[in-house]
Amino acid sequence: MVSKKDRRKRPDTIHPKKKYSDNPPDFVLLASLYPSFKDFVFYSRDGRPRIDWTNFNSTRELTRVLLLHDHGLNWWIPNGQLCPTVHWIEDLFSSDIIPNNNSNGDIVRGFDIGTGANGIYPLLGASLLGWTVVGSDVTAVALEWAERNVKRVFSLIIHLLVETSTCKFCREKPMLN
């Protein structure tokens, strides 16, 4: 476990390959464009706009707004589900291990184990890179919301398979294949 002292030593920046490393999200602009985000923006003592990173609703709304604003994805998750932070998601897509495109014309296929209600890796992999991605999960709420999120962005011709089946290893709980 990392101590508080060690956490303070870390630089207050994000990975240089990330979209927001040189140009962080403009909370004031986003709040003016998306009124639902406005309630979560406040000003620190030094006058800079901030959000409360410990508040689930605040980070969920920021994620929703960034996915819509920067990627054209209409996305939502219910309370109690894990909320991805958009600024680190690009690590997957900038990996040297996974090709972003294939010069041979082969299809890049992915499998996201535990995709959750957000289904964020399959959604972005499919919509931004044209990958075929399968997401899996064992909870009914995750399946329901992953499917809703896929249907919301279906106009992007997403290559994401959402199918409910039964898995004998999951004690007959539905599973996203």
Image: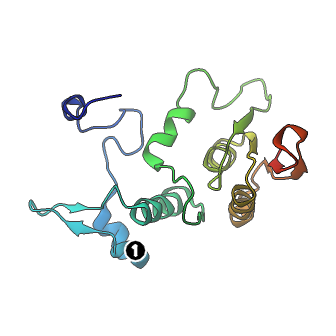
167 over 119 or under it: above or below: above
Residue 21, quarter of picture: top left
Q: Nearer the viewer, residue 66 or 118?
A: 118
73 over 138 or under it: above or below: below
Q: Nearer the viewer, residue 23 or 95?
A: 95
Query: Where does the N terminus fall, quadrant-wise?
Result: top left
**What's under tag 1, amino acid-wise?**
Leu
Query: Where does the C terminus fall, quadrant-wise?
Result: top right
Tag 1, which secondary structure?
helix
Q: Position of residue 77 (x, y in %)?
A: 59, 63
| Extreme-bottom residue of the structure | 35
| Extreme-left residue of the structure | 46
What colouring does the structure picture have? rainbow
Query: Would you say 11 lies left or right of 137 here?
Result: left
Q: Residue sitting at 9 percent across and 59 percent down?
A: 46
Q: Position of residue 70 (x, y in %)?
A: 49, 57
Residue 167, quarter of picture: top right
Q: Residue sitting at 17 percent across and 60 percent down?
A: 48
Could you classify mark 1 by the number of other residues whose Cα lies within 10 Å: few (under 14), some (14-19), or many (20 or more)? Answer: few
48 over 99 or under it: above or below: below
Q: Nearer the viewer, residue 100 or 137?
A: 137
Q: Position of residue 78 (x, y in %)?
A: 59, 66
Q: How many marks?
A: 1
Q: Residue sitting at 30 percent across and 61 percent down?
A: 51
| Extreme-front residue of the structure | 171
Q: Which residue is disc 1 drawn over? A: 33
Q: Position of residue 112 (x, y in %)?
A: 69, 38
